[in-house]
Amino acid sequence: MINLLVLPLLIPLVTAALLIFLPKSIRVQRAVSVVSAIGTLAASIVLLLTVKDNGIQTVNVGSWDAPFGITLVSDTLSALLVTTSSLITLSVILYSFRSIGEARERFYYYPIVQFLLVGVNGAFTTGDIFNLFVFFEVMLMASYVLIVIGGTKIQLRESIKYILVNVISSALFVIAVAMLYSVVGSLNMADISQRIAQIGSLPILTVIAVLFLIVFGLKGAIFPLYFWLPGSYYAPPVPVLALFGSLLTKVGVYSILRSYSLFFYHDQAFTHELLGILAIITIIVGCIGAIAYWDVKKIIIYNIIIAVGVLTFGISVATEESYMGTVFYTIHDMIVKAALFLLIGVMIKITGTNDLRKMGGLMKKYPLLGWTFLVAAFALAGIPPLSGFVGKLLIVRGGLAEGAYVGSLIVLLSSLVVLYSVIKIFMNGFWKAPKDYPGEENQPVLSLWAPGALLVLASILYGVGAEVMYPIISQATDALVHPAIYIDAVLKE
Amino acid sequence: MEILMSIVIGALFASSVYLMLSKSLLRIIIGTGLLSHGAHLLIITMGGLKRGAAPLLGEKAASYVDPLPQALILTAIVISFGVTALFLVLAYRAYQELGTDNMDEMRGNEAND
């Protein structure tokens, strides 16, 4: 079963290709999408268990031995992220049935979601820096279509800015890869790491590290490069927003984590310091946005930026504990962000507005939705025993141990702001006097609520079962702290 | 030769930045095209502009060119071609729908929503 790690890429790819030929039969599209998403999830869970028991799995595509060919590498970290992405995609597909609308379904919505999953899973799995660029492009191409599908005015307007930003960042990615190639003469990530270790610390490597930070920071939305995110993510409908918010930014964060732990860990004085400062400013900017708005979508969108800041802070500290916290928190944040987006999507469907001031009193009629939202909100803020707590605890402890007191304090304080911002949604949306909303009886609330609840359940299990997850996470962290494990697995024999 | 190429790449980047900073959507798209051209030239320059035989074993030459940068450029050209095509279609559709190609009028503020 050496080809197991190709399955989470192959299943969505084949499904997408198949679905393109069936645009008119929506029922078939839905059925095939769900079956394939479940298949992808099952394959990735099997992959995760295999990696946990047998160590890092690799496939040399076309039987060209590493470092000459393209290598796909699945270590515990990437298997974990692939599993999480597949789970989120499954819930979003389930949510889309009753919410995305027939017009979008006819225009290749489901195949594009599958293509997005190919790109995301590929970016997590690949062990080749140029192949990472290619999977970024697969993912971005799908996201360009998803952001504009439906063709409303705001979508067209925002998609142009989104594409422009990403075209520029792709060009920068190519430039960064070219410069790295000219210095080390390899594209295989394990081989690059080995050669950088031999070269030692050249000043040009710091330049390349910062260039990669700009590229991945644009995707992941860290401080000066986040400007496009609130506007662009606001435009598409909620299921697409949930996919983008939970998956796309995390791909950027993962790439920073991978490149900074595998390539640029020798000379940390400048790069990691820079990353730490940017992370802190990112958190602050996100906090300001999360407090400022009365629009539910905007509030959660700014919460994405806060989470990215917390994660990059964990990466910048670069100790075993903070890496472990980062891995823990990444998975938590992907699940719970997607859940929150889906739940506020239900609120928007019921009330017909994004504006919190026009909502109110949902608790009376929809108690289940209210309680689910509250649990998700607490999980996001990191209240124990829910899933946000463990990751944040480890990140803060790692930060304090390294003497990064300001950053750790900001991370802690940001939890309060996160709590305030989501409780603001809860208090204004679910409390207050009940109101009647036109057309609320026609909304399929229960079937919209279920996918969100599935993710909240996953988040609870992840938090309560932290004990079970701990060995897996710590295995994922080992490969980050000791690049030799990763290198040996890829370049064996 | 490398220096000449660097100047060309710099000129391409400069003009693409100039174009992308303008307000007209079409100029912006041309700017992204020039930007990717610059990036592709940069790859081939970074790989080293060596003169040598084609990288085939039967050539028995003293030196071979590095095939990898060319493979990278080929991939990057295809991708940027696809993105530019999509971008152009989208710009046309946006022009039809929004009635403008001026980025100033596409700001996301209350007046435009």
Image (cartoon, coloured by chain):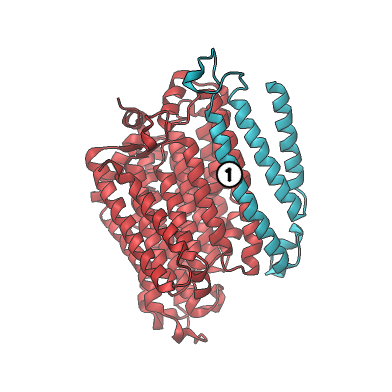
Asked if residue A405 shows in the view, the reply is: no
Q: Position of residue A295 (x, y in %)?
A: 56, 68
Instruction: Name which residue lies at 76% across and 46% down.
Output: B19
Residue placed furthest toward the top? B62
Side of A117 relative to A352 (left or right): left
Of the 4 image quadrants, the one containing the N terminus of chain A is top left
Left/right placement of residue A53 relative to residue B111 reads left
| Residue ranking furthest to the front | B58
A322 sits to left or right of A46: right
Chain B tint as drawn: cyan
Amino acid on which disc 1 is placed? Val
**In the figure, the red chain has which letter?**
A
Note whether A67 is above or below A374 in the view shown: above
Relative to A431, is A58 on the left or the right? left
Quarter residue A325 falls in: top left
Q: Which residue is mark 1?
A: B78
Q: Is residue B96 above or below residue A490?
A: below
Q: Judge by depth and name the residue closer to the eye, A487 or B65.
A: B65
The quarter in which the C terminus of chain A is drawn is top left
Residue at the spot x=36%, y=54% of the render? A11
Disc 1 element? helix
Point 61% across, 50% down: residue:
B83
The answer for which chain carries disc 1 is B
Local crowd size for mark 1, using a 10 Å CA cut-off: few (<14), some (14–19), many (≥20):
few
